[in-house]
Image (tube, rainbow, N blue to C red):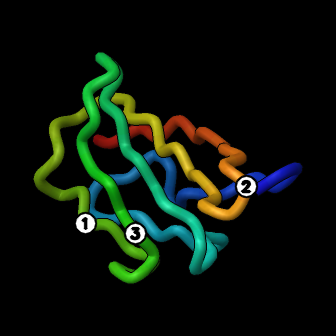
């Protein structure tokens, strides 16, 4: 993930988000604005997350590359 931004689309989101740049060796950790770990999403679960049941607010999508542990964090708004 070094020097690579991962997009989360759409952002803001209402029903679902897509993770188009997520690679097979990445992991995604989703945190609430309070820092609570909400979700660990391995690439084997696909590049789509259903957020329709999530409470509205700001979340932080942290992408981690298992090979070299580099990270990228993207703030995401859920309506």
The secondary structure type at the circle numbered 2 is loop
Count the labels in the image: 3
Q: Which of 61 and 51 is in front in this view?
A: 61
For label 2, count other residues whose C-alpha is less than 10 Å away and answer few (under 14), some (14-19) or many (20+): few
Q: Which of 6 and 2 is in front in this view?
A: 2
- Above or below residue 57? Residue 61 is below
Q: In which quarter of the image is residue 78?
A: top left
Residue at mark 3 to residue at mark 2: CA–CA distance: 16 Å
Residue that carries the numbered disc 3 in the rendered image:
42
Q: Residue at x 50, y 50 (%)?
A: 11
The label nearer to you, 1 versus 3, is: 3
The secondary structure type at the circle numbered 1 is strand
The label nearer to you, 3 versus 2, is: 2
Q: Which residue is drawn at 45% across and 46% down?
A: 12
Q: Which residue lies furthest to the right in this view?
A: 3
Residue 48 horizontal/vertical position (percent): 38, 74
For label 1, count other residues whose C-alpha is less than 10 Å away and answer few (under 14), some (14-19) or many (20+): few
Residue 79 horizontal/vertical position (percent): 29, 41
Residue that carries the numbered disc 2 in the rendered image:
68
- Answer yes or no: do the residues labelled 1 and 3 have beta carbons within 8 Å? no
Q: Nearer the viewer, residue 48 or 57?
A: 48
Residue 71 horizontal/vertical position (percent): 66, 44
Residue that carries the numbered disc 1 in the rendered image:
50
Q: Tell whether 77 sits left or right of 2.
A: left
Q: Which residue lies furthest to the left in this view?
A: 53
Q: Residue furthest front?
A: 67
Q: Earlier in the sequence, mark 3 or mark 2?
A: 3
Q: Earlier in the sequence, mark 1 or mark 3?
A: 3
- Above or below residue 68? Residue 47 is below
The label nearer to you, 1 versus 2, is: 2
Q: Which residue is drawn at 60% across and 39% down?
A: 73
- Above or below residue 24? Residue 42 is above
């Amino acid at each position: 993930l070094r020097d690579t931004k991962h997009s989360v689309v759409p952002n803001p989101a209402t029903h679902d988000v897509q993770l188009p740049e997520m690679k097979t060796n990445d992991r995604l950790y989703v945190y609430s604005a309070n820092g609570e770990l909400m979700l660990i999403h391995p690439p084997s679960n696909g590049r789509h997350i259903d957020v329709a049941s999530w409470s509205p607010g700001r979340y932080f999508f942290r992408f981690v590359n298992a090979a070299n542990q580099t990270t990228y964090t993207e703030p995401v708004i859920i309506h």
